[in-house]
Amino acid sequence: MAEEEIKRRTRIQDVTRQMRKNKSAMFGLGLLFIIVTLSVGAPLFAPHDPHDVDLDRQLKPGFWSDDGLPGFYLGTDALGRDLLSRLFYGGRVTLSVGFVALGFAVGMGILMGISAGYFGGAVDNVVMRIVDILFAYPALLLALVVAGTLGRGIDKAMLAIGIVYTPQMARVVRGAVLSIKETEYIEAEHAIGSSTWRIIFKHVLPNSLAPIIVYSTLMLATAILDAAALGFLGVGAQAPSPEWGLALSLSRKYLVTGAWWAATFPGIAILLSVISLNLLGDGLRDALDPRLKGGAKL
Amino acid sequence: MKEYVLKRLAMLVVVLFGVSIITFVLVRAAPGDPAVNLAGEHATAQVLEQIREKYHLDKPIYEQYLIWIEMALKGDLGRSIKSRELVTVEIVERLPTTLELSIFAMIIASFFGILAGIVSAVRQYSPVDYGVMFGALFGVSMPVFWLGLMMLFIFGVKLGVLPIGGRLTTGIYLERITGLNILDSILTFNGEAFLDSIKHLILPSVALATIPMATIARMTRSSMLEVLRQDYIRTERAKGLSERVVVYKHAIRNALIPIVTVIGMNVGLLMGGAVLTETIFTLPGLGKYIADAILAYDYPVIQGFTLFFATAFVIINLATDIIYVYIDPRIKYK
């Protein structure tokens, strides 16, 4: 390849090229795209109203059985609601809990990580001790206790999971900031008299983005698992929400009667969402941060 | 080394102080009148007054905290609203169930995780490697509660080969010595209870082991690959040592060092998993205890349990770090 051509490629083009070559990451991205599209566009794609209760069609099987009802491809739940439509609508709830929680964690984590990493000293000490204290709680337990004491509902679940992931993000950002702070171009910025804010927002933050993006993707995967777990335990989304964890929890007692589908499909939906994010995250890590290479591949 | 341990112990005190404040504030921040929260919804005005006096709710908040922490240090975490039993007594009663489940899960996770990781690293890019990594991807992405339910459905309901919940079949008698059923049945030479306890443990511990097993397999693989690339391994191969000796005698020992940390880190993950696993398999352990307490707004239990568990967790983490320094002479802490 000609030298000139190499020069002309920007970092983003570089990463995009690498990502395109990574089959498992592209598979993850595609899967994620499908899941998000079906959830966001639930009103367009769902064949039925997800809240349409009809006790005459309780726990009917889907396409695999002759007892199934036409048009109800994955069967119905205990209240006769269409499972497929509830999966689409449920994705909106579960995924948005994950996304909002992660958004909170990224925002707070950047704030804490930059103050700790860039200013150092006493600020660093205080921020990192807060991080240490939050790390003293096992993640799901902290989320459960925060959500449980605040009350029920998806807003509390979002806040609870957001708080849990904040210290992790703060550590990631701090680490990145520390290594960038020592580089020569930051020193040069200081020398020409750039303001602290300019240095932080124009140089330190943009150069810390790689690990932030990688860890956000991987943390989003576990945040979604936690969102569903809180729903499952009864402190997240509340009935009649079609949230995946809640749907699974409410359908589990029918497993014993042989109606396996109502509890099985929400679980598969959670699993596929998390897998897609993990594949994408591992791919991004390989492309953005070659030092961390070695995750799972398909 | 001594200095490192002392410094970590000093930090432990700071962290535990912070943990106690957060735990205290968290429960106080719960919506509603704390007296009503403590006494339950149906308490009379007179009872509420008694509660306020008894729990010093009429005093300033920092004084309330000091009283609470003083009691906690004396081993009194308050009483459950629901059962009226002491929280410490209930924790001690439920601890063996969770302990047994976690130990079993950790053994399964470590054994199969390390084994899979080694095989996968030794045959890098072979179908076995891809298979293991594909399995690990599923493992880390698995909603534990769903996996548990599916196993319960397949092995408990459809095939009917394993029990669907509980610790012991009703009708089987087991004398309680330690509360760990397996150990107790061995101590009392109770073969029937021994087999029955193991049967009850299989499904929940496999479900609980899934995520740690996957992370341990991934970690072992990358750690093994790292070690296999080292110069001393090349030297050994050059000396003509057989591949078996190189891998099993030299590489594994060094590769396993970081795994200790991963196993230690998984203790927290296990606790989160235990909440879900114990709920699914109706095991009377700590996970189900806290889940039930939260659903019942049993604040003294939430507060006491959280303080107890965070303390235990911090100490376990510290222990892991110290063990790590001992077994890896290359690491020197300032």
Image: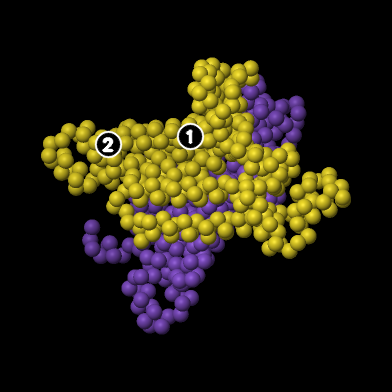
Rendered colour, chain A: purple
Q: Nearer the viewer, mark 2 or mark 1?
A: 1
x and y percentages locating residue B116 in the rendered image: 36, 34
The answer to which of A201 and A2 lies nearer the viewer is: A201
Instruction: Pick out the residue farthest to the bottom.
Output: A193
Q: Where does label 2 land, which residue?
A: B122
Q: Amino acid at mark 2?
A: Val
Determine which of the numbered discs, if any, sits on residue B54 in the image: none
Q: Secondary structure at mark 1?
A: helix
Q: Residue at x 82, y 51 (%)?
A: B50
Cα gap from disc 2 to disc 1, whole angstroms: 28 Å
Determine which of the numbered discs, if any, sits on residue B103 in the image: 1
Question: Crowding at label 1, few (<14), some or many (≥20) Cα neighbours within 10 Å?
Answer: some
x and y percentages locating residue B170 in the rendered image: 64, 19
Quick check: can you spot residue B18? Answer: yes
Q: How is the image coloured?
A: by chain
The numbered mark 1 sits on a residue in which chain? B
On screen, residue A95 versus residue B113, left or right, reads right
On screen, residue A109 versus residue B299, left or right, reads left
x and y percentages locating residue A112 in the rendered image: 51, 65
Q: Residue at x 59, y 22 (%)?
A: B174
Rendered colour, chain B: yellow
x and y percentages locating residue A248 in the rendered image: 62, 35
Q: Amino acid at mark 1?
A: Ile
The answer to which of B331 and A56 lies nearer the viewer is: B331
The answer to which of A127 and A79 lies nearer the viewer is: A127
Q: Residue at x 44, y 67 (%)?
A: A117
Is the C-beta separation of discs 2 and 1 under 8 Å? no
The numbered mark 2 sits on a residue in which chain? B
On screen, residue A266 versus residue A179, left or right, reads right
Q: Earlier in the sequence, mark 2 or mark 1?
A: 1
Quick check: can you spot residue A17? Answer: no
